Image: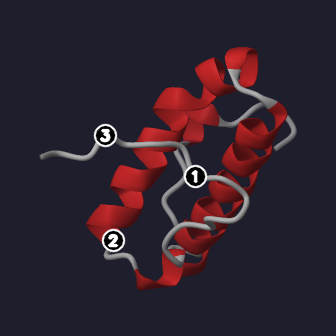
Amino acid sequence: MSQTPHALTEDEPGIDPATLSDDDLIRELHSLHRTRLDTLRHGPDAALNNHLRRTAELESEYLTRHPGREVDQGRLTQGS
């Protein structure tokens, strides 16, 4: 019997981002970014809070691993 995925609650913090492989970290970030608008528009407050927290955790871990990440000059705004 397969289990259906469910949204994490505040009591279920998710896997520590520091323990994820680079591929898993990117996959998790893709998943969160893909579901962002739907969660913002239609998710209950607890789901939105969890989404915000988890996004911050994963993005912080990415920046920790890639402090000198390559910045696309075409994406800079004037004055940046």
Residue type marked 1? Leu
Which mark is on residue 17?
Answer: none
State how far apart marks 1 and 2 are (Cα): 21 Å
Residue located beneath label 1 in the image? 8
Q: Earlier in the sequence, mark 2 or mark 3?
A: 3
**Element marked by disc 2:** helix
Residue located beneath label 2 in the image? 22
Task: Note whether 54 is above or below 11 in the view shown.
Answer: above
Count neighbours of disc 2 (C-alpha within 10 A) and say few if under 14, some if 14 to 19, many if 20 or more: some
Residue type marked 2? Asp
State how far apart marks 2 and 3 are (Cα): 25 Å
From the viewer's perspective, is the residue at label 1 or at label 2 nearer? Answer: 1
Quarter location, residue 58: bottom right
Residue at 52% across, 41% down: 32
Q: In the rendered image, is residue 68 in sight? A: no
Residue at 68% across, 37% down: 76
How does the figure colour the protein chain or chains? secondary structure
Quarter location, residue 36: top right
Q: In the rendered image, is residue 71 in sight? A: yes
**Element marked by disc 1:** loop
Q: Earlier in the sequence, mark 1 or mark 2?
A: 1
Residue type marked 3? Thr
Q: Residue furthest bottom?
A: 19
From the viewer's perspective, is the residue at label 2 or at label 3 nearer? Answer: 3
Residue at 46% across, 42% down: 6
x and y, in percent, of residue 33 in the image = 53, 36
Residue located beneath label 3 in the image? 4
**Element marked by disc 3:** loop
